[in-house]
Image (cartoon, rainbow, N blue to C red):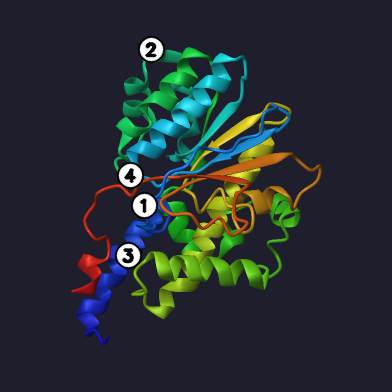
Amino acid sequence: MFFTYTAQIRLTSGLLAAVLATGCAIGSKTAATSAPLLPNSNTYQVLLLGEVHDNAQGHKLRYDLLRKRVEAGWQPAIVMEQFDRENQDLLDKAQKKCLDAQCVIQVAGGARWDWQLYYPVIQLALTHNLPLIAGNLSRADASRVVRDGVKSSFDAKSIQDYKLDQPLPAAIRSAQQQEIVTGHCNMLPEMMVGGMVDAQVARDIWMAKLIRDQRPRDVVLIAGNGHVRKDIGVGYWLNQVAPALTVYSVGFIEGSDNGGRYDSIQTLAAQQRDDPCKQVKK
């Protein structure tokens, strides 16, 4: 398919805004159901819980899983992709002053999420005095990474710890590139792909770094399925720095292809939605 220059710019702008907003790709539409498979013990220090961002069933199942563990006495910090890390001060103030989740959302939330899907998790954190940690890059920070590369948003020690002064491992870059191209309807101009891979990787490393910063406290990560993957996502980057953490990852997916990406999966019926590729296929 060929585009005029104007059409390509319009497509590029729309897709770049989408990836800088969430850093996550479009999900599969395969329908399936199953019970979540989770470890019986609480020996895992880090629990990575994924999502299809707009799948209400997945949000409910994930919340119920987390609520049961917290009510049984577990006291993790909760790192959330939905809050920009640059807004941690606002989030800290909101947790001290707010009586309900809606107040936290108004103080520290952004405009690009369906916050009512996250209300229960935020309220759970307030009720049980669990720290909320902002895990995402802002759009401005992600734009800098797209322009200047992964290491542009990290300090010298992090660059050394995660070996960001070296090229990304070929397997990581290749897999992330495939996910981004496929997740954006196979319509991305080639010139955009490398920068978008860098932005996705930078998000994963920031989440891994913030999880490590909570030690020795246990941590839950609430993020898109692409981020909680153990082969190329946050789970991979957590294993690149000593000391080792015990990590368990759960994908909440529309479909049934684990492929070694997660320790377990909760498959979901597909959310009813318009074809996400319809606009870019015109």
Image point 42% across, 14% down: which residue? 97
Packing grade of label 3 (10 A; few <14, some 14-19, many >=20) is some
Nearer the viewer's eye, disc 3 or disc 1?
Answer: 1
Residue denoted by label 1: 31
Packing grade of label 1 (10 A; few <14, some 14-19, many >=20) is some
Q: Position of residue 19 (x, y in %)?
A: 39, 58
Q: Position of residue 251 (x, y in %)?
A: 52, 46
Q: Earlier in the sequence, mark 4 or mark 1?
A: 1
Nearer the viewer's eye, disc 3 or disc 4?
Answer: 4
Quarter in which the C terminus is drawn: bottom left
Q: What's the mark number on residue 54?
A: 4
Packing grade of label 4 (10 A; few <14, some 14-19, many >=20) is some
Task: Please name the amino acid that badge 3 sits on.
Answer: Leu
Q: Position of residue 31 (x, y in %)?
A: 36, 52
Residue denoted by label 2: 99
Q: Separation of disc 4 and disc 2 at Cα?
A: 26 Å
Task: Please name the amino acid that badge 4 sits on.
Answer: Asp
